[in-house]
Image (cartoon, helix red, strand yellow):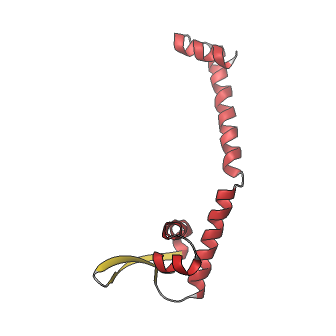
Amino acid sequence: MTIREFYQSVIDGNITEDALNKANELLNALDARNEKRKSADSKAKRESADRRVTVLDFLKANEGQFTRDAIAEATGLTPGQVTAACKALGDAVAKSEVKIDKARKIVYNLA
């Protein structure tokens, strides 16, 4: 059964054993393709891993609490990239809220 025939049988509401087998075949192919894509290394994944290492190295080298803006300025990353990296680092980075001047800011330090 071709994919076109499968779609036509679904549209017609004629679900046969062949249609079920084709559906299982298509789902298995989709799962295999998604698994391959998930495990593949990409430029974006490498860059994200590099940003996490950069932020972690900065926090290890400097004691204290730092806002995302301070980390971004010191590492050359954007504040959004710093926030994403800290979130991805999970338990390695502690997040807390402090009052700076009149505003409350999120600060990060090594856990």
**Total residue callouts:** 0
Q: In terms of image quadrants, where is residue 22?
A: top right
20 sits left or right of 103 in the view: right
Residue drawn at point x = 62 percent, y = 63 percent: 48
Q: Nearer the viewer, residue 57 or 36?
A: 57
Left or right placement of residue 63 versus residue 17 in this view: left
Q: Is residue 105 visible?
A: yes
- Is the residue 107 above or below the residue 63 in the image? above
In front of the other: 30 or 84? 84
Q: Residue furthest left?
A: 102
Where 38 falls versus 66 (above or below)?
above
Q: Quadrant of the N terminus?
A: top right
Q: x%, y% of residue 28?
A: 67, 33
- Residue 13 screen position, x and y as percent: 52, 12
Looking at this view, is 26 or 52 the one in front?
52
Which residue shows up at 64% across the image and 73% down it? 53
Q: Nearer the viewer, residue 17 or 94?
A: 94
Q: Residue at coordinates 62% horizontally, 20% vertically from top-left?
A: 20
Residue 64 position within the rendered picture, expressed as x and y whole percent measured from the top left: 48, 88
Answer left or right for 68 relative to 48.
left
Relative horizontal placement of residue 59, taking residue 3 as reference (left or right): left
**Residue 111 visible to an observer of this rendering:** no
**As drawn, 71 above or below 61:** above
Where residue 47 sits, quadrant-wise, is bottom right
